[in-house]
Amino acid sequence: MSPEESSDADAASKPMTADESLSALEAAIAQLDEGVILTDATGRITLVNDAAVRLHGVAALGVPPEEYSDTYHLLTVDGAPYPSEELPLARAVLRGETVINERWKIRRPDGSEILAVGTARPVLGANGRQLGAVLTLRDETAHEAALVAEREAEGRLAESERQFHTLADAIPTLAWTADADGYIDWYNRQWYEYTGSSPAEMEGWGWTALHDPAVLPEVLERWQASIRSGAPFEMTFPLRGADGRYCRFLTRVTPVRDADDRVIRWFGTNTDVEAERLARDAALSSALRTERLQALTAALGAARSLDEIAHVVVAEGRAATGAETGMLALRVPDTNEVTMIRTEGFPEDVAQLYERFPLTMIGPSAECIRTGVPLWVSSREALSERYPNLDAVWDQCGAQALSSIPLIVDGTVVGSMTYMYTTPQIQSEGDRSFFLAIGRQAAQAVERARLFAAEREARASAEAANKSKSDFLAAMSHEFRTPLNAIVGYAQLMEIGVHGDVTHAQLHALERIQRSSEHLLSLINDVLNFAKLEAGRVEYDISVLRLTDAVATVAPMVEPQLAAKGLVYEVDIAPELVVKADGEKLQQIILNLLSNAIKFTEKGGRITVNSAHRDGTGANFVFLRVTDSGIGIPRDRQEAVFDPFIQVHRNLTRTTEGTGLGLAISRDLARGMGGELRVRSKEGHGSTFTVALQRVL
Ligand code: ADP
């Protein structure tokens, strides 16, 4: 150690004198960053350091308390004037109070303002006597501004946090936030709704309880890897819902970084991909349903009987809707009863029990028919509540849900179809409209089947009635003929004198008996023929014959009448024409047509019989025409003449013979031989009846 150094050290270690100490203190005070103002016991200002001068803009040495407020312009923080006696320094020196960290504003002489915070306290001597007061103060303006800015920033942050939470609560996905370490501090409402958990259970790592234990380790591993690396996280895994079932969620977690790119938070969402899959399934099933509905429509179109329809409706309806059981019940017309047309999937005894039941029964099928309103019962509780009387049935069938759809035709409920499920069912809008569509189809099909059955029944009974009428006519005609033959026979015997001589008058009477009898006989024959035709009992003996021969055979039978009326009779038939026909029946037709022609043609008229045919392919028919120049048939009656018992010229024929059966029989015979009979006529000018016959080439 050098002597100088040692003397310096000696000087430093030497105690200061009181003066030295005081001036050191004064120097220290002068250099303080804080403002310091000192007073004597009367309050007169004895010391103002530089900082205090800077703060106030004035040095006020020697100023007494009553002049403080003239020198220093102090305002409260709110900008109100500070009462002089309340100035901190005055309170400390005059009232001995200690004022700690009071805030006020200082308005400087140059008009600028600063915010100051200061402490004033009395200065007490060793004996406790008050020597004066001291005020220390510092400029708080910058600090305050920083504080305000911070408070505002905090407010904004809280606001944005609030907005974020509101937004996150509004989205349909589950969402949450975690701190940088992955500690979850907030979940949105959907999270709590879906999981049914409480915030206390969920805080931090509570979410792990909602994971499938088999998947959880992988989730944790990947999540922790993300937390370590700060990389986004994405994974799809199941989460347990409040109902205990797991649904798959696509989970994405994004890091939120600060200005220095450090991860400060994590923002996570869980999107229910199950719902998306279900929606896809629903879309798929709606396409399938359309297909099924089309298949059902086709199947129903082909179904004729109620049984067939019920089969289609119940089986298809079940298959299309996944129902365990199905049934179709119809209201028995004009009664208050319902009958089960078909059941499927029911235990035998249950099905038997409800084969037929009153419309008033408390049960879905009957109710649906009564009200005409579809029923959608989605749970077992609802079933029991609605139909407690059928609890045993619900138990036996394991029913958990049920749909019943009314079958409505023209506003009338004709029945219902009911499907039952062994799992609870919430029928969506799509399910419902599908059921209603099946219901509409079924209702129409049922109506069709009923009409069809009614028509078949009516036809059968009409046919039966017709047949018995024909049978009756045939029997009657036959019974008439026997006695008539006897009448004719005995009359002839009398006529030829077997029973002795007959007078001229008697002879005349016998002739009339015979003529009338023969007429009657021909009428009866007509009726008999017709009855036989109607009863389908006519047999045809078809052979190949020449057309000219058939016409030639008939001619002699009508010659007397032709002659009697002086009618011109012409025949012009191609001799080579050969037809396939029953000879006798063809003659009967020609005879009938010629007789009519003669009957309805005035004296001096003309009757022509000719033929027409075509050559070449398709020339399968020969047309035999009987034309007269008679009275003709009105246009609107030309088809009616072929109906049995129709006589167009009744007034005329009243006197003439006839039954109105001849043309009906002739047409039936022509058709029976594979041909046809038609008429063309002009009233007042004549008629042409044409027989079409099968030609032999
Ligand atoms: P009918 O001759 O026994 O009365 P048809 O069935 O043979 O019965 O004839 C039915 C009706 O058709 C006749 O009553 C007549 O009014 C009309 N008719 C038939 N042939 C002719 C014809 N050639 N000209 C005018 N009317 C005819």
Image: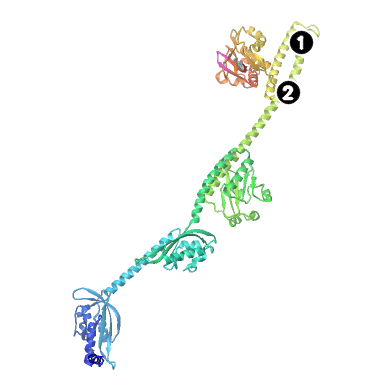
**Image quadrant for the C terminus?**
top right
Residue lying at 76% horizontally and 6% vertically, measured from the top left: 503
Find disc 2 in the rendering and name its residue: 475
The answer to which of 621 and 130 lies nearer the viewer is 621
Crowd rating for badge 2 (residues with CA inside 10 Å; few <14, some 14–19, many 20+): some
Residue 438 vertical placement versus 481 (above, below):
below
The image shows residue 501, relative to residue 100, as above or below, that is above
Q: Quadrant of the N terminus?
A: bottom left
Check disc 1 and report its element: helix, strand or loop. Answer: helix
Looking at the picture, which amino acid does disc 1 mark? Gln
Task: Looking at the image, tell me whether mark 2 or mark 1 is earlier in sequence order.
Answer: 2
Left or right: 338 with respect to 172?
right
Q: Is residue 497 visible?
A: yes
Q: Nearer the viewer, residue 260 or 386?
A: 260
Q: Which residue is mark 1?
A: 492
Is residue 366 in sight in this rendering? no
Q: Is mark 1 within 8 Å of ligand 1?
A: no
Asked if residue 680 is among those painted magenta in the image, a careful observer would answer: yes
Ligand number 1: quarter of image: top right
Q: Residue furthest right?
A: 499
- The magenta segment is 679-687
* Residue drawn where x is 23% and y is 88% of the image: 24
Q: Do the numbered discs 2 and 1 sit on residues whose CB atoms are within 8 Å?
A: no
Left or right, residue 449 beside residue 14: right
